[in-house]
Image (spheres, rainbow, N blue to C red):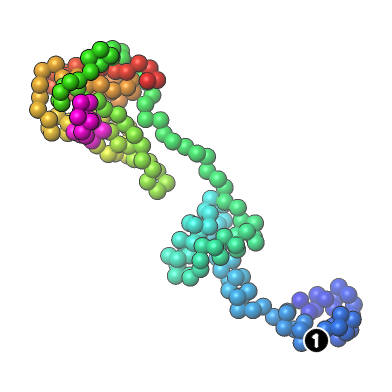
Amino acid sequence: MITDIKQDTGHSIRAICGCLKLARSSYYHAATPTLRQSSDQQIGDRVADIFHRHRSRYGYRRIYQELSDEGIRCSRNRVRRLMGERDLNALQPKSFAPRTSDGRADKPCENLLVNNLPKRPNEALAGDITHIQVGEGWLYLAVVIDLCSRRVVGWKLADHMRSELVVGALDQALQSTERRPNRIFHSDRGSQYGSKAFRETMSRTGMAQSMSARAN
């Protein structure tokens, strides 16, 4: 830094400080980085390494966590500041939520509950699928409830939405409830509920299948 000023101005440090009415010691003190500045430089370099290694997808929270895993003590606010000073802006991922119903059931069934709502428990069951974000992926939860009591009688969690997911939830519901004639199972028109495996389970247990209208 001292050499740069000499080269840029062509004058000595003594002359420059005299013109500015500053003691030369003030310049030399300012030219020496403080412990905090040195620490910022070292941690900032590590922050940049992590940022670029993850292809600009890590924000300050993830970088802070990785620094902590490496034993580097640093607050989240400091990581955010160092990223801002170096113009390290994480890419924002596109928002994504998986569709759990595609409305593609083969030969959809009619809605048997339009004028036939259950009056007692165990007369009608209903199933649906929802998604749960875990880390950087998704899990899928199939649930079966009793439409009268609203009690959950069966469920299954998996990392896929194949027909085994809803069949597993129905099997658990069948094990936890008493079988009775003319029982109804209601769902949307998702392809899982229209699959061969699920309908074979329905036929084996003597349940009548019911489906909502499209997009309902």
- Crowd class of label 1 (few under 14; some 14 to 19; many from 20; radius 10 Å): some
Q: Name, please, the residue furthest toward the front.
A: 119
Q: Is residue 129 above or below residue 199?
A: below
Q: Indicate yes or no whether the magenta region holds residue 152.
A: yes
Viewer-proximal residue among 177 and 53: 177
Whether residue 146 sits left or right of residue 97 in the image: it is left
- x, y percentage for residue 203? 16, 18
Q: Which residue corresponds to the image point at 10% horizontal and 18% vertical from the top-left?
A: 181
Report the predominant secondary structure element of the magenta stretch.
strand
- x, y percentage for residue 183? 16, 19
| Image quarter hosting the C terminus | top left
Q: Which residue corresponds to the image point at 65% horizontal and 61% vertical from the top-left?
A: 85
- x, y percentage for residue 88? 61, 56
| Image quarter hosting the N terminus | bottom right
For residue 119, which quarter of the picture?
A: top left
- Whether residue 48 can be seen here: no
Q: Which residues are magenta?
A: 143-155
Question: What residue did someone put label 1 on?
Answer: 24
Give the SS element for disc 1. helix
- Whether residue 180 can be seen here: yes
